[in-house]
């Protein structure tokens, strides 16, 4: 069995903001012990502001405020909740002029 896309949604929140979420069911392996692969990203003006992923040997992590930090994965449902919470904060920071639009 190869990877099977189980969820994909791409939404333009505004002219300058895009959110794209992809979740695949994959065979359980050392890289994907839960049998799930994911990529959730928030772009503003074409630059990644927020991202969650578990790309191969990198494990579960998120990209936030220009830093990459570990992410403790519990479930896909919790992943969506955590991403949406961080997304709301990132959008609020951006509206207040406090958000960073690029990574180092």
Image: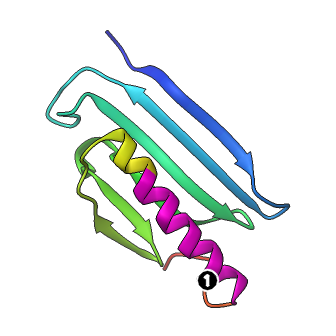
Asked whether 92 falls inside the magenta stretch, the response is yes
Q: Which of the 4 quarters of the picture holds residue 76?
A: top left
Q: Which colour scheme is used?
A: rainbow
Q: In this view, does 33 lie to the left or right of 49?
A: left
Is 47 located above or below residue 102 in the figure? above
| Along the viewing direction, whichever of 48 and 34 lies nearer the viewer | 34
Give the residue at x 63% y 37%: 9
Q: Which of the 4 quarters of the picture holds residue 91?
A: bottom right
Query: Which residue is tagged 1?
Result: 93
Q: Seen from this angle, which residue lies furthest top?
A: 1
Asked whether 89 falls inside the magenta stretch, the response is yes
The x and y percentages for residue 71 are 28, 60
- SS majority, magenta: helix
Q: Seen from this angle, which residue lies furthest right?
A: 15
The x and y percentages for residue 27 are 25, 20
Q: Is residue 82 left or right of residue 71?
A: right
Q: Is residue 68 left or right of residue 41?
A: left
Is 103 located above or below residue 86 in the figure? below
Q: What stretch is highlighted in magenta?
A: 81-96
| Along the viewing direction, whichever of 59 and 9 lies nearer the viewer | 9
Give the residue at x 39% y 20%: 3
Check the picture and name the quadrant holding the N terminus.
Answer: top left
Is 64 located above or below residue 77 in the figure? below
* CA neighbours of label 1 inside 10 A, class few (<14), some (14 to 19), many (20+): few
Give the residue at x 71% y 62%: 46
Q: Which of the 4 quarters of the picture holds residue 95?
A: bottom right
The x and y percentages for residue 13 are 76, 57
Give the residue at x 80% y 64%: 16
Q: Check disc 1 and report its element: helix, strand or loop.
A: helix
Count of marks overlaid on the render:
1
């Amino acid at each position: 069995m190869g990877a099977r896309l189980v969820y994909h949604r791409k939404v333009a929140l505004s002219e300058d903001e895009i959110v794209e979420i992809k979740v695949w069911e994959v065979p359980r392996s050392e890289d994907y012990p839960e049998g799930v692969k994911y990529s959730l990203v928030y772009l503003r003006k074409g630059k990644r502001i927020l991202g969650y992923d578990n790309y191969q040997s990198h494990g579960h992590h998120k990209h936030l405020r220009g830093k990459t930090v570990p992410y403790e994965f519990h479930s896909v449902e919790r992943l969506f909740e955590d991403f949406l919470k961080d997304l709301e904060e990132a959008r609020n920071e951006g509206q207040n002029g406090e958000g960073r639009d690029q990574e180092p």
